[in-house]
Amino acid sequence: MLSSIKSCTVIGIDGMLVEVEVDVVFGLPIFSTVGLPDGAVRESRERVRAAIKNCGYEFPQKKITVNLAPADIKKEGTGFDLPIAIGILAAAGLFNRCELSSFCVVGELSLDGRIRRVNGVLPMALAAAAAGIKAIIIPEDNAAEAAIAATAIRVFPATHLPQVVEFLLGMTEIAPLEPFRLNDLRQARQSEVDFSDVRGQAHVKRALEIAACGGHNILMKGPPGSGKTMLARRLATILPEMSFAEIIETTKIYSISGQHHGVQVLRPFRAPHHTISDAGLIGGGNTPRPGEVSMAHNGVLFLDELPEFKKHVLEVLRQPLEDETVTIARANMTLTFPARFVLVVAMNPCPCGFLGDSRNRCNCNPAQIQRYESRISGPLLDRIDMHLEVPVVPIEEMRGTHTGEPSAVIKERVDRAREIQKTRFTGNNRIYFNSQMGPKEIERHCLLDPPGLALLEKGVEKLGLSARAYHRILKIARTIADMEGAERILSANIAEAIQYRRFDRKSSGS
């Protein structure tokens, strides 16, 4: 007897429907799975056999063939356990009077019939909804992340195989997930850090506010203990709230990566260790998975102790910083992951860290300092919009009772500047804030008066800036003008933007 039930797999960050066909016929008791299954899918026959038996159902002692269609796409993961079990029971005659075509089923089975969580449930649920399927059965442990899909499809969280069987037979009820309520979730999840915790460093806070307003990348250089990491961790708290589309996109990435944190309403902050590999940073593997740059999508990627990262690891950042995507090619597939983030990097001024520190003596010679700085290539440095020196905070300011502005106040100003940019780029599906502008947009929106143009030309000549750095100064100046509510870029905006390129080296960068 033949049965069929819908399931789903993940390709990149998107779900794809898979039809699980089960044929049970007389013959030698052989259980085979076809349709390009990977090792985890092939091993499902042992989990399915044990789960069916241990739940009190009769496992057919016949020839069983499972086909996963379409057969030319590789199927991975353990999410096919539950639909295969349901398909076998249906082919054995248990669901003769049930209509299974309206359901999509996903879940891993333990040997006793419990349903375990799987990766990628959110993109699977969205793919099922897009295909017109009315309901999806998922593991209860995936309910938190699947809640966002409950507005598009009925989502039934299940805990064990008999519960699903009885539900499909109409013998019991499973309460569907409540529709997702964005405002309630935002109120429930608040950031644990705030800019009011930071004493002093007014000029660094100003630069971080500019970075948040325009989506600019930033480099902070200063001695140990000057607050670089503390400041970087608070940048995400002043970025605008994520839109519904951004929440879905970000949650999908975390869902397929196996980091089940529920719906991602807060902007991500990722801080990988400097021992990370290039595949860990960019993504990769035999079947490509997103790396840290994609995990930071719509948020902040923080690289502390930048010169300690392997040079070839840093160089792979150049393409994502320009394209805001990561494309990974393999022999059997090419996948593209989103990677739009604000890059924040921090470094010491020298190997010992105390160059320019009035309280500690630097023991490094010029050659050591040069070798240390040369670990960061000119082309990568060229792609970082803003460069800052972060001095040690005087003890008097540390002891003071005065607290800085809270993140909420700064965020209000950021929101106003972002609204100006949103209006400016209305109708452009590629550009959302100033750092994304290309040459045509810069020419249209970054007009300078004669004094401003003269000041910019002088700064470019003095610093030996590349064409890329020239454009980045214009984009920073445009952001500063937006923060002031000005339509035109003034000389003062250009002067402030130029000072954020102080670490530039004379280089032809590419």
Image (spheres, grey):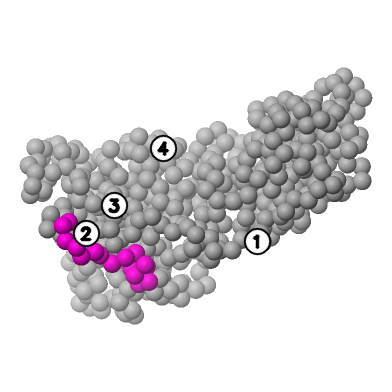
Mark 4 and mark 3 in contact? Answer it, CB < 8 Å. no
Mark 4–mark 3 Cα distance, whole angstroms, equals 26 Å
Mark 2–mark 1 Cα distance, whole angstroms, equals 42 Å
**What numbered label is drawn on residue 278?**
4
Q: What type is the residue that disc 4 sits on?
A: Asp
Q: Which residue corresponds to mark 1?
A: 179
Q: Which residue corresponds to mark 2?
A: 199
Q: Is residue 244 inside the magenta stretch?
A: no
N-terminal of the two: label 4 or label 3? 3
Q: Is residue 388 left or right of residue 282?
A: left
Q: What type is the residue that disc 1 sits on?
A: Pro
N-terminal of the two: label 3 or label 2? 2
Question: Pointer 1: residues within 10 angstroms few (<14), some, or many (20+)?
Answer: some
Q: Which residues are magenta?
A: 398-413
- Residue occupying the point 81% across, 41% down: 165
Question: Pointer 3: residues within 10 angstroms few (<14), some, or many (20+)?
Answer: some
Kind of element beneath mark 4: helix
